[in-house]
Image (tube, rainbow, N blue to C red):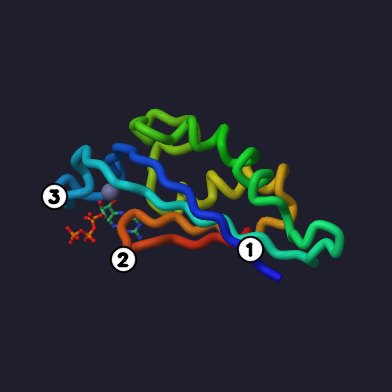
Amino acid sequence: MKITQAFHFEAAHRLPNVPPTHRCHRMHGHSYRVELTLEGPVDPATGFVVDFFDVEAAFDPLLKRLDHFCLNDVEGLENPTAENIAVWIWERTRPALPQLETVKVFETPHCWAEFSGA
Ligand SMILES: Nc1nc2c(c(=O)[nH]1)N=C([C@H](O)[C@H](O)COP(=O)(O)OP(=O)(O)OP(=O)(O)O)CN2
Ligand SMILES: [Zn+2]
């Protein structure tokens, strides 16, 4: 069984490694959406794979480091592409949530990166 919980945060960023002519080289912002998908058996007693409250508790400290910040200033996110943000979240969330299967980071409703550990 898979379960997914979505989160939102607002943040600024610039992409330092694209050419200066690329519009994302300039500072700008996104309303990011993060989806965490967990996979595992359903506990027959609770009916849960994992309690959504536990997912929220695990992700909240990261959300506090991202929301309304300039992502380039966050340690490990000096090049804050959607891909790198997805890996950053994966590496910091999986220890607390071993059932984590996928991290999706949406920069816009149409563009996202998805990471499942490789
Ligand atoms: N593979 C990736 N490509 C791009 C990334 C990324 O993280 N991974 N990021 C960007 C920029 O962050 C850019 O800001 C993307 O957003 P935006 O320009 O707003 O996207 P749209 O093209 O959908 O904007 P519209 O104004 O709606 O056309 C670029 N590439
Ligand atoms: Zn951007």
Q: Residue at x 22, y 38 (%)?
A: 27
- Earlier in the chain: of badge 1 and badge 3, it is 1
- Which residue is painted at 44% across and 38% down in the image? 77
| Number of residues whose C-alpha sits closer than 10 Å to that of mark 3, classed few (under 14), some (14–19) or many (20 or more) | few
- Whole-angstrom CA distance, mark 1 to mark 2, is 22 Å
104 up-or-down from 54: above or below? below
Please name whichever residue, 108 or 117, is drawn nearer the observer in this view of the structure: 108
Please report contact status of discs 3 and 2: CB closer than 8 Å, yes or no: no
Residue 118 shows up from this direction: no
Q: Amino acid at mark 2?
A: His
Q: Nearer the viewer, mark 1 or mark 2?
A: 1
Disc 2 C-beta below 8 A from ligand 1:
yes
Residue 51 percent coordinates (x, y): 70, 51
User: Is tag 1's residue or tag 2's residue first in the polypeptide sequence?
Assistant: 1
Res. 21 mark: 3
Amino acid bearing label 1: Ile
Residue holding disc 1: 3
**Quadrant position of the N terminus in the picture:** bottom right
In the image, residue 16 above or below residue 114: above
The residue located at (29%, 46%) in the rendering is: 30
Q: Which mark is residue 110?
A: 2
As drawn, which residue projects farthest toward the bottom? 1
Q: Nearer the viewer, residue 79 or 111?
A: 111
